[in-house]
């Protein structure tokens, strides 16, 4: 969640980003290393107290943007609007609000006459009447003039039901306060539990899919059943069929056809290749252009050359497959000998018969062949045919025959 907030702030032009965390959140602190400076709040005394953990001299130097780390749906555009509104108004503080009847969050209260900012009432302190009549929700992002913020922080008291120092109470000591109203209520979503996490995930998934369809020229036949990470890149005119999951730093080329029921993680697929159904491409797999990966095939740490095919129900682990090669249905590269993983090399133009087992480390030469059901435990020379259990070479092509096959 915090990565989304950091990305939006960075894209909006924020500098010198600090993240305030609990000392118990060691994994989070390690995750943030190199991206932001971590500041520890050793006692959980509220959001204003958290901000007080940053040196007052640092806060006084410039305008300060503050955001909740559990609000992953805030966009860079909204941060830019907030900063622009703050600079234009010249006010000591600018906040964001949204009208949303669905949320039981902190309410922004305006004066009855001028409709200017009066205060923010936190959820725990809101009366039933306020919840029923006021649906202007605090989004949870703020922009302050640094010097005024530091002075106001010294005046905040913990006279509330939570006995905490609220950041929103800083606004009681600043005037005027500018309010930026945003149009998308989803941006105000704070993830407080697993239900909100699921809601935020669904919203973000739709944003990602819409971006690929509108900006990338990708056809997604059923967005309701398609899951694509934000770190995935997909080329124009590629089609993604239903029940496909693409994760990590995967890269899909142009004019590809993926799915249905395909799982891809940290893999690359070249232009005009197709994959599926029920295929699984695991991390470290690299597929070149014009490749066919058939149904129920699984590849991991495997490279597939241009124009090759891995049609059906095959497993290629730690394999280097050359160009224009064909892997028969049911083929397995047995890459684990009980203590370590070993590689299999299959040369250009090789034709592997159905149900072949290749026991790594082993190499099939260029234009070599295996018979159906073979168990290959020794290298097969270029142009040779190997059959049997264990496989033995029964024929070798001449140089002229291999040249003719290459043509």
Image: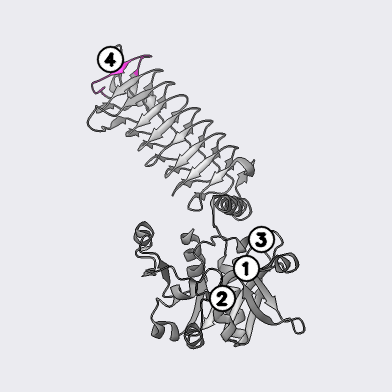
Q: Distance of mark 4 from mark 3, alpha carbons?
A: 68 Å
Q: Distance of mark 1 from mark 3, alpha carbons?
A: 9 Å
Residue 328 position within the rendered picture, expressed as x and y whole percent measured from the top left: 42, 21
Q: Please give the residue where the numbered disc 4 appears in the rendered image.
A: 391
Q: Quadrant of the C terminus?
A: top left
First in sequence: mark 4 vs mark 2: 2
Seen in the picture, residue 227 relative to 12 is either above or below; the reply is above
Q: Distance of mark 4 from mark 1, alpha carbons?
A: 73 Å
Colour logic: one colour
Seen in the picture, residue 254 relative to 136 is either above or below; the reply is above
Q: Closer to the camera, 207 or 311?
A: 207
Does residue 289 appear to the left or right of 114 in the view shown? left
Q: Distance of mark 2 from mark 3, alpha carbons?
A: 18 Å
Seen in the picture, residue 107 relative to 192 is either above or below; the reply is below
Q: Please give the residue where the numbered disc 1 appears in the rendered image.
A: 106
Chief secondary structure of the magenta span? Answer: loop
Q: How many marks?
A: 4
Does residue 267 appear to the left or right of 191 in the view shown? left
Instruction: Residue at 52%, 71% (x, y): give it.
Output: 12
Q: Distance of mark 4 from mark 2, alpha carbons?
A: 76 Å
For the residues carrying marks 4 and 3, which lies nearer the camera in this image? 3
Q: Please give the residue where the numbered disc 3 appears in the rendered image.
A: 103
Mark 1: give few (<14), some (14-19) or many (20+) Cα within 10 Å. many
For the residues carrying marks 4 and 1, which lies nearer the camera in this image? 1
Secondary structure under the numbered disc 3 in the rendered image: loop
Secondary structure under the numbered disc 1 in the rendered image: loop
Q: Can residue 13 be seen by looking at this rendering?
A: no
Q: Distance of mark 1 from mark 2, alpha carbons?
A: 9 Å
Q: Please give the residue where the numbered disc 2 appears in the rendered image.
A: 168
Please provide the residue range marked out in magenta.
370-381
* Residues at marks 4 and 3 touching, judged by CB atoms closer than 8 Å: no
* Residues at marks 1 and 2 touching, judged by CB atoms closer than 8 Å: yes
């Amino acid at each position: 969640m915090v990565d989304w907030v950091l990305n939006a702030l960075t894209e909006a032009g924020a500098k010198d980003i600090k993240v305030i965390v609990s000392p118990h959140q060691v994994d989070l602190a390690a995750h943030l290393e190199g991206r932001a400076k971590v500041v520890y709040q050793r006692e959980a005394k509220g959001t204003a107290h958290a901000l007080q953990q940053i040196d007052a001299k640092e806060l006084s130097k410039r305008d300060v943007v503050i955001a909740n780390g559990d609000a992953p749906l805030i966009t860079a555009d909204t941060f830019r609007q907030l900063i622009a509104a703050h600079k234009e108004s010249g006010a000591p503080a600018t906040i964001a609000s949204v009208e949303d009847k669905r949320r039981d969050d902190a309410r922004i209260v305006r004066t009855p006459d001028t409709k200017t900012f009066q205060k923010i009432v936190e959820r725990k302190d809101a009366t039933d009447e306020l919840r029923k009549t006021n649906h202007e929700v605090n989004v949870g992002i703020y922009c302050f003039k640094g010097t005024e913020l530091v002075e106001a922080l010294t005046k905040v008291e913990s006279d509330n039901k939570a006995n905490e120092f609220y950041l929103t109470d800083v606004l009681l000591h600043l005037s005027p306060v500018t309010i930026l109203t945003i149009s998308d209520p989803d941006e105000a979503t704070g993830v407080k539990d697993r239900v909100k996490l699921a809601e935020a995930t669904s919203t973000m998934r739709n944003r990602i899919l819409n971006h690929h369809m509108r900006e990338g020229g990708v056809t997604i036949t059923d967005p309701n059943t398609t899951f694509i990470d934000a770190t995935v890149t997909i080329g124009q005119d590629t089609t993604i069929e239903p029940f496909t999951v693409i994760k990590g730093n995967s890269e899909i080329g142009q004019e590809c056809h993926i799915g249905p029921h395909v799982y891809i993680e940290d893999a690359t697929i070249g232009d005009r290749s197709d994959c599926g159904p029920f295929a699984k491409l695991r991390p470290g797999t690299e597929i070149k252009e014009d490749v066919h990966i058939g149904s129920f095939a699984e590849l991991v740490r495997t490279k597939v050359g241009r124009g090759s095919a891995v049609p059906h129900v095959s497993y290629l682990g730690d394999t280097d497959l050359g160009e224009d090669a064909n892997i028969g249905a049911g083929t397995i590269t047995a890459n684990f000998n009980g203590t370590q993983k070993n590689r299999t090399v299959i040369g250009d133009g090789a034709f592997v018969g159905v149900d072949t087992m290749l026991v790594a480390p082993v190499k099939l030469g260029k234009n070599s062949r295996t018979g159906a059901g073979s168990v290959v435990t020794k290298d097969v020379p270029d142009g040779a045919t190997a059959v049997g259990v264990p496989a033995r070479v029964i024929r070798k092509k001449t140089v002229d025959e291999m040249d003719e096959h290459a043509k």
